[in-house]
Amino acid sequence: MGLRFGLLGTGYWAAETQGAALAGHPGITFAGVWGRDAAKAGALADRYGVGAYRDVDALLADVDAVAVALPPDVQAELALRAARAGRHLLLDKPVALSASAAELIAAETGRNGLASMVFFTNRFCDDVEAFLHEAAEAGGWDGVRATLFASVFQPGNPYGASPWRREKGGLWDIGPHALSVILPVLGPVEEVAAVEGPRGTVHLLTRHSGGAAGTLSLTLDAAPAATRHEIAFHGSGGWAAVPKGERTPVEAFGAAIDRLVRDVDRGVTGDPCDVRFGREVVDVLAAAEAALRRRGTVRVSEVTGTDPA
């Protein structure tokens, strides 16, 4: 029934969000699970009553699309492998940890005419999408202020033991969420400046193609009393805050499945959250990382070698 999906990954996000949404979706077939730990793959497959695969290529041969819940560097390698096998992609953010890796995936999906989706959670909430559409149509924005302070390294947090999050921090983990709602309103980022602060905080300044500017503060290690998630645009009409998103992560992932299935059924590509947009987000993150190293301003095109538009 419908597209056959395979799930790559066995961690908390794979089990509680992606696996739950795949298993509960009435329009697709959840065909199987592959993971780097065969025992975990078997346990997760048993939980949802699907097959466990020891060989990722065997899973790719049995499905039409893959959902990926793996560290970004691992995801990038396997997403490229899946695209070369002609499989549609439902990826997590960020798509990859380098602009070049993200570009390879985007190029391969384009060559093979594949549908793709990157799961920026709130971009699959109707209230957020409606806000972004109205804000982009209205225009007149001078800039944006975003403060995303999470505190994931506290005891019991399911994401706190993630090695890639400890290494890459808020810039790469929650930075994509911020950029996913900022770019559709203010346009592509042309220049980035960045400095580090206490508790792993990264502060970004972005200059967009239309002249607007952004200030973003991001960390995964905020003091528990200082956690905050606020994104607000400002301009001649005052301030406008982005809604929080009315769907749970499982519901939002179900909406992402809906959109991917719709595109496959219609034979179209180019969703606003496809891998090309995911690549654009990675381009900005890579430029920000370079700006931190150089302690200066970096043009996105200088780092990526691509046109940010």
Image: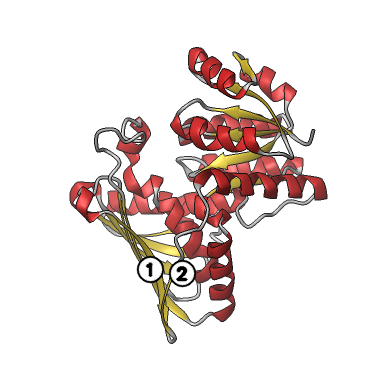
Residue 191 sits above or below residue 151 on the image: below
Residue 138 lies left or right of residue 177; in this view the side is right
Q: Residues within 10 Å of mark 1 (few under 14, many from 20)?
A: many
Which label was assigned to residue 183?
none
Instruction: Between residue 18 and residue 78, name the one nearer to us.
Output: 18
Picture colour scheme: secondary structure
Q: Residue at x 57, y 74 (%)?
A: 134
Q: Closer to the camera: disc 1 or disc 2? A: 1
Does dot 2 land on a helix, a strand or a loop? strand
Q: Residue at x 31, y 49 (%)?
A: 150
Instruction: Between residue 23 and residue 119, name the one nearer to us.
Output: 23
Which kind of residue does numbered mark 2 sit on?
His
Instruction: Between residue 62 and residue 96, name the one nearer to us.
Output: 62
Q: Residue at x 60, y 23 (%)?
A: 33
| Mark positioned earlier in the residue sequence (1 or 2) | 2
Residue 6 sits above or below residue 233 on the image: above
Which label was assigned to residue 208?
2
Which label was assigned to residue 214?
1
User: From this viewpoint, which residue is outermost toward the left?
Assistant: 198
Give x and y (percent) for residue 43.
52, 17
Which quadrant of the figure has residue 297?
Answer: bottom left
Q: Kindly check if marks 1 and 2 are in contact, taking CB atoms under 8 A apart as contact.
A: yes
Residue 200 lies left or right of residue 176; in this view the side is left
| Quadrant into which the C terminus falls | bottom right
Does dot 1 land on a helix, a strand or a loop? strand
User: From this viewpoint, which residue is outermost toward the bottom?
Assistant: 236
